[in-house]
Amino acid sequence: MRRRGTAIFFLILGISLSALAIALNISWIFLNLRQVALLIFGVLFFLLIITGIILNTVFLVREIRRNEQHDAFLNSVTHELKTPIASIKLYLETLKARDLTREKQLEFYDIMLDDNERLLSTVEQILQASRTSEKQRAMNLAEIDIGDLLKETIGIVRSRKHLDEGAIKFSKPADPIRVVGDRSELQTAFANLLDNAVKYSGADPRVSVRLKTSRGNKAEVYIRDHGIGMARTDLKRVFKRFYRVPNNATGTVKGTGLGLAIVRSVIAKHGGRVRAQSKGEGKGTTFFVQLPIS
């Protein structure tokens, strides 16, 4: 709150100085119409002051937004870490205090394992975001069959989310499509896209994955869901760190706001590109990934 209050103070100060500069300059012009040289100098000086004030105001507005995003990120991470820890503690205390049947014990173990997986996933995502920001970090490059990688990643996401076979459908081409890249990083990127598609699809997720080649010797992957969709203004912003889609303001979907930023960083390091497409809120989203074929 202190950072935000300081930023607002300087924002108001900048606006006030701008108004004062305009008033003084106009008064000065009317009092010195005959002094052309000084008039020109005054106009230039005025423009310089206004430019500085505008740049200062833009910087402050960006800082306010960045601080708000950081605060939202910290709140989300705190929730994502605290909730599974509290759940595991509760079930362990119950197991210790009560004499439960073997069936009930196994049920509790499964719940705790799921919470542990959620906790590890959050930690791994934060670590992955840190790693992707290291531009000099070496990659373990190898030739990869992108179809096999997608099939394996879909299986991991299905198992993690306890989904049936029809929840994520994959159209794999007959011929293998190979790219050169870091298998672990690419799998992380596609897992984040699939996890995002499932997470924003509601109680009955239906996700389709399609792989094909393009004329420019590129591998193209389309991941489409039928979930909440996005407004046009959000399509580019979703790849920024800590950004959360506004129609998730209700808090029904949790997350760190790092997943899609990691995707963009990984795909860019592999010489590819990623973008989002949506016809609007409630009409689903399609993520398009393009990678160079080896």
Image (cartoon, rainbow, N blue to C red):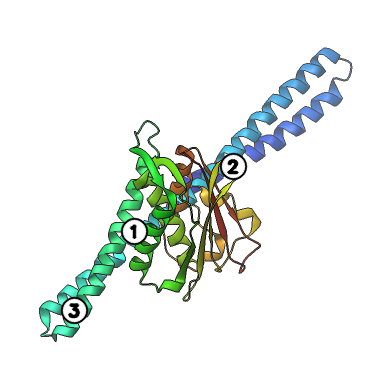
- Residue 11: mark: 2
Mark 3 Cα-neighbour bin, 10 Å: few <14, some 14–19, many ≥20:
few
Callout 1 amino acid: Thr
Residue beneath disc 1: 78
How far apart are labels 3 and 2 at the CA level?
Answer: 58 Å
3 or 2: tag closer to the N-terminus: 2
Q: Which residue is mark 3?
A: 106
On the image, the x and y values in percent for residue 195 come to 43, 61
Between 145 and 270, the one nearer to me in the picture: 145
Tell me residue 159's x, y (percent). Answer: 33, 67
Q: In the shown orientation, is residue 178 left or right of residue 218?
A: left
Most extreme residue toward the top is: 37
The answer, for residue 29, to whether it is visible in the render is yes
The percent position of residue 240, horizontal first and vertical second, equals 51, 47
Say whether disc 1 or disc 3 marks the residue closer to the N-terminus.
1
Q: Give the side of residue 72 with respect to residue 13, left or right.
A: left
Residue 182 appears left or right of 102: right
The answer to whether residue 16 is left or right of residue 172 is right
Name the secondary structure under disc 3.
helix
Q: Identify the residue at image location x=33%, y=57%.
A: 122
**Which amino acid does the dot numbered 3 rest on?**
Leu
Amino acid type of the residue that numbered disc 2 sits on in the rendered structure: Leu
